[in-house]
Amino acid sequence: KAGVTQTPRYLIKTRGQQVTLSCSPISGHRSVSWYQQTPGQGLQFLFEYFSETQRNKGNFPGRFSGRQFSNSRSEMNVSTLELGDSALYLCASSLWGSYNEQFFGPGTRLTVL
Amino acid sequence: QKEVEQNSGPLSVPEGAIASLNCTYSDRGSQSFFWYRQYSGKSPELIMSIYSNGDKEDGRFTAQLNKASQYVSLLIRDSQPSDSATYLCAVNMNTGTASKLTFGTGTRLQVTL
């Protein structure tokens, strides 16, 4: 069974731009969660989508948004990029949600200049 | 108090020894617990999940859970240099009407020859 895939793997943007990251979950998994990982803050929960609905959201500003499609694929968008948004963005999929085992994709490394 | 606490390490153990990694959590109602391994520059990889009090063994890994003490640990027997990585403890926590996976900051393990 194929694992979680994320595209692109690397991105370089400048302040003020926006970015869209994509995640394809493991086949059959309906829950997709997004995390931001930085050396200083560790892994921080952004949001979770299940059946095209945002089920939970972390403490991030409204510049961070996401969506999920009917095939469970998910995208997250960051608008008006700031230097502090430079991070590894990780997507994780699970069958039903955070109660179940979550499997991570390889991540998207975003650098904001 | 942090929601999920781990000693950041590094924890240094000689090859062949037992490595013991510990984690405490704040939400007494948490029901699912996970250990992830993360190599430098890579995404987290699920090692173990545990849902009930007691021990759960999988190969060289044993997870231990004590809900009364709000404590979960991971033992790695016959430690190998390839086990050198950061180990993340993750706890499913309720946030009102939903739940999310909350991560500790990780313990860096070094297995020495």
Image (cartoon, rainbow, N blue to C red):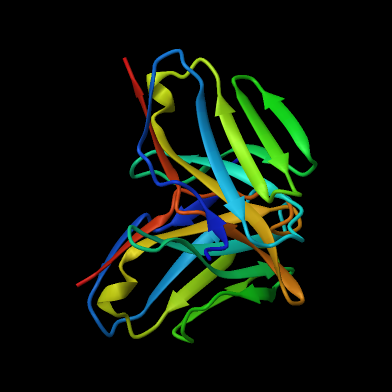
Residue at 64% across / 48% down in the picture? A26
Q: Quadrant of residue B39?
A: top left
From the viewer's perspective, is residue A42 above or below residue A55? above
Whether residue A108 sits left or right of residue B103 in the image: it is left
* Name of the residue lying farthest toward the right: B52
Residue A72 point in image, percent of width and height? 67, 62
Count of labels shown? 0
- Viewer-nearest residue: B67 or A31: B67
From the viewer's perspective, is residue B65 above or below residue A90? above
Whether residue A53 sits left or right of residue A43 in the image: it is right
The answer to whether residue A37 is visible is yes
Q: Quadrant of the C terminus of chain B?
A: top left
Residue B55 point in image, percent of width and height? 73, 30
Q: Quadrant of residue A16?
A: bottom left
Whether residue A53 sits left or right of residue B19 in the image: it is right
- Viewer-nearest residue: B83 or B52: B52
Residue at 72% across / 59% down in the picture? A97
Residue A81 point in image, percent of width and height? 32, 80
* Name of the residue lying farthest toward the front: B69
